[in-house]
Amino acid sequence: MMAARQSADEIFREFKEHSISEFFRRNSQMLGYSGKVRSLTTIVHEYLSNSLDACEEAGILPEVKIAVKELAESKYSVTVSDNGPGIPGKHVGKALATVLAGTKFHRYLQQRGQQGIGASGCTLFSKITTGKSIHVKSGTSREHYECDVTLDIKSNKSLIENMKKMDSDATGTEVSGEFGDVKYEKSDHGVYEYVKRTALSNPHVTIRLTEPDGNEAVFLRATNELPKRAREIKPHPLGITTNDLVDFAHRSESRKITSFLQESFARVTPMKIDELRGIVKDVDLDSDPRSIKWEDAEKLVKAFKEIKWMAPELDSLSEIGEKQIEIAIKNILNPVFVSVIERKPRVFRGGIPFVVEAGIAYGGSAGKPREISKAEAATAPIDGQRSSSEGNILRFANKVPLLFDASNCAITEAAKGIDWKRYSIANFDEEPISVLVNVSSVYVPYSGVGKQAISQEEEIIDEIKLAVQDCARALQRYLGGVRSKEVQESRYKTIMRYVSQLSGDLSDITGAKREEIEKSLKALVEQRYSQPSDEEEEADQKQEEGGSKPGEGEKGEEAEEE
Ligand SMILES: Nc1ncnc2c1ncn2[C@@H]1O[C@H](COP(=O)(O)OP(=O)(O)OP(=O)(O)O)[C@@H](O)[C@H]1O
Ligand SMILES: [Mg+2]
């Protein structure tokens, strides 16, 4: 029998609008809440990233305390406190309990956060797994308070309760909450590893982590110098879409499109405006930007592409630094060989600056397969299918370690796309080799809201490949030296075994003294096999130093894989 047909009116009786937080309540895996171990790491990652961003923006050396306590099976409390500038009381609800609200979304400034989802995602996750609020203590230079914040999921509005003044004179923020469906585990994906890698890529930070068993792990800062301050820049005309332009225009306070373009975007000068006028004759550039039409914005974006612009400002980026990457690699992997490179900044999508740093480690625990615990594998459907090569790629974006979603990431794609055989690595997955890459940008194009993988933009992949290949060439030179030395040594040993036998035989035949023959034969062999060649000496020296700089006296900066 045919089912009764339904009219549009009947179907549309179910028509409902829902809020962004309602959406993430159902799809919390998109925020990184899938798998118990991963979920706990996500919480610490969001709070710690916020603390570091806040301190750096305020010019404060970060001191962050993290405490994780087990309350019951799969239920933990997490407290994160910092010495940052604090959150003004009137903003605390929006900052910590409204999804898509924050101070970073519309800015072209290299920061760890960029969406306004992280902290509110934690508040949401606490609410849906325990029904509880997040307790906040915060102090700014003007006020000190504590309160409970949570959110009304249906309306995506924050709810603040028990607001109290606090007696204190220190600035900073402490958030603490209870979370269900989580688990503390000391694996490669756990909180400890995340914190350790964060400390290594941020040498100016001190982090004290109290683990559920009471152990306190202290990661002391290695330098008192704050990293180079990332500078806020304006978007470059070549990097924006029609939609961006309309969005910027509608929020503009300028009276004319001409002044709006000059104020909102980099490199737009009165001369460039004249050029634009010549190209888009039918768009009134003296009209109000807030009433710009899509068609006109489209024409402008098209015209931008015809103009020769000065390149975007590239000094807006803040890197980890070659020295620190080398320290990080040695600390994590204890290898016998390290090679590190920092490339020059580049742009992607025509106007967004980014810079790649890379390092290669060989030997030690480099390339060892990551330990994936049973619990983790069973509870992490998204990250379930890993290939072994993903284990030896240490990924970072804006100095934040990326521990999940490796197979989706531009870094993995680039490293796997290299023809490793050309660099004396017969099998990348099986040799003791690890690759570390950090991508810094004012806007990192993550492939998901969980921010664990960088989307596969061609320009970024190419740049990562060039960086890794540069390190690979240094590795190849090192391995060449080591391998030829091994061959020499084995020949030396074999020949030496025959020397005494041969000396006896020669002495019998010639009547010369056996000891003398043996002595001169040995001298001959020593001379031939135990004197390292110049190349070997160089390799030895590098090995002693534990590293080498790639590209020296070699191919230039733009060298591609031939
Ligand atoms: N520890 C803190 N100190 C000062 N301000 C903070 C702190 N934590 C959060 N904030 C403020 O709350 C806002 C929202 O944080 P949230 O983590 O939700 O988003 P975000 O960091 O802007 O972006 P993302 O979603 O990428 O993390 C931040 O933009 C910041 O203004
Ligand atoms: Mg954040």
Image (tube, rainbow, N blue to C red):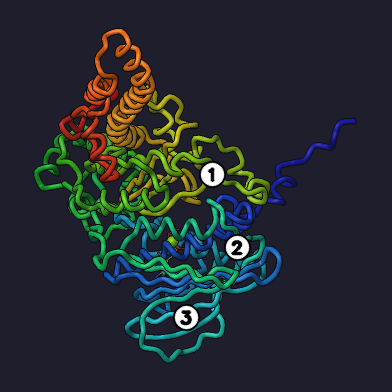
- Residue that mark 2 sits on: 125
The residue at the point 52 percent across, 68 percent down is 97
Q: Nearer the viewer, residue 449 or 402?
A: 402
Q: Nearer the viewer, residue 494 or 289?
A: 494
Left or right side of 423 for 541: left
| Mark 1 residue type | Arg
Q: Position of residue 145 (x, y in %)?
A: 45, 85
Q: Position of residue 526 (x, y in %)?
A: 25, 26
| Mark 2 residue type | Phe
| Mark 3 residue type | Lys
Q: Nearer the viewer, residue 150 or 177?
A: 177
Marks 2,3: beta carbons within 8 A:
no
Check disc 2 and report its element: helix, strand or loop. helix
| Neighbours of disc 1 within 10 Å: few (<14), some (14-19), many (20+) | some
* Of labels 1 and 3, the one closer to you: 1
Q: Position of residue 278 (x, y in %)?
A: 14, 35
- Residue that mark 3 sits on: 137
| Neighbours of disc 3 within 10 Å: few (<14), some (14-19), many (20+) | many
Q: Quadrant of ligand 2?
A: bottom left
Residue 370's disc is 1
